[in-house]
Image: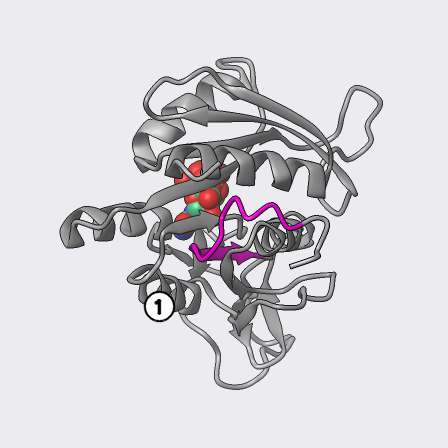
Amino acid sequence: NGGSRKTGKLLGKRVVITAGGTREPLDPVRFLGNKSSGKQGVALAEAAVDAGADVILIHGHMDVAPPQNVKLHSIQTALELRAATLSAAAGADVVIMAAAVADFRPASVSMGKIKKRDDVADPVISLVRNPDILVEVVAHRSAQNLSQLIVGFAAETGDADCDARSYAEAKLKRKGCDLLVVNEVGPDEDGAERVFGQESNTVEIIALDGAEPVHAAGSKRAVADAVVALVAERLGTS
Ligand code: CTP
Ligand code: CA
């Protein structure tokens, strides 16, 4: 095919990737969002396309343009992401959940713009939990008996009780996906942001079956290539 980068590692594989951040509306002009730039998800989509895959990119808000040569599906909320992902997952060989999904959404959405008023107390936003889409994709795979590889992402911070890695291992078991791409988020020792909006990333890819973790660092594309290589290896197509 002449494309020097086309490795064919995922030739003809149907890959669903979620990317970017969800936005949960409060009223017609406001939402609860998150810091996801979409860069890692877009890099994954590009890496998968270059490996010969047919890619569906389901994306929330992103700071970057979506890539070429993928099927795009734009969503706003976690509930929309869930519907789009579960429907696309039905025919997928691989599902990669790189989107930053809001864990909670406002319990109610105001029809009109929320106003400041001197005669009533300031509003308090109550939240309800969103479904865990990754857990649902894993359950869907079992229910439908699909042969499908499922990859989650986790942004972890360590704390006094536990380091980021142990939290990630517990999360992997909870989710039941095959691979979890873990990065440590938040400021580094010098107070600079490590992941969100940055061009580079450092991750450990851990496996539910206990395989040796894979370390990947560099540009988000380099991390994406490492994920694609591992996916291809697991599909037996590398
Ligand atoms: N995820 C999802 N649905 C949600 C929340 C998260 O599918 N409602 C997915 C993300 O896309 C990601 C993985 O689950 O692939 C891990 O997300 P993360 O926010 O790290 O995990 P949570 O289970 O939400 O745990 P935490 O309380 O640490 O945020
Ligand atoms: Ca979360």
Q: Which residue position is annotated with label 1?
A: 83
Mark 1 Cβ and ligand 1 under 8 Å apart: no
In the drawing, does residue 132 fall left or right of residue 182? left
Q: Nearer the viewer, residue 96 or 225?
A: 225
Span shown in magenta: 6-19
Q: Residue at x 65, y 36 (%)?
A: 223
Task: Give the residue furthest to the bottom.
Answer: 112
Q: In the rendered image, which quarter is residue 14 located in?
A: bottom left
State the image coordinates of residue 211 (x, y, percent, origin top left).
40, 18
Q: Secondary structure at mark 1?
A: helix
Answer left or right for 215 relative to 199: left
Which sits in the foreground, 138 or 165? Answer: 138
Residue 13 appears in the figure:
yes
Q: Nearer the viewer, residue 53 or 212?
A: 53
View quadrant of ligand 1 = top left
Q: Is residue 3 above or below residue 184?
A: below
86 lies left or right of 21: left
Residue positioned 65% across, 75% down in the render: 116
Residue in view at x 64 percent, y 75 percent: 118
Q: Residue 15 placed where, x, y %?
A: 45, 55
> Callout 1 environment at 10 Å: few (<14), some (14 to 19), or many (20+)?
few
Task: Examine the image and state in which quarter residue 49 appears.
Answer: bottom right
Q: Is residue 107 visible?
A: no
Q: Callout 1, which amino acid?
A: Ala
Question: Which corner quadrant of the image does residue 45 belong to?
Answer: bottom right
The total number of labels drawn is 1
Would you say residue 151 sits in the magenta stretch? Answer: no
Whole-percent x, y for residue 46 in the image? 64, 55
Q: Position of residue 147 (x, y in %)?
A: 26, 46
Name the residue located 37 percent from the left edge and 56 percent from the top edge: 130
| Figure check: 149 above or below 194 | below
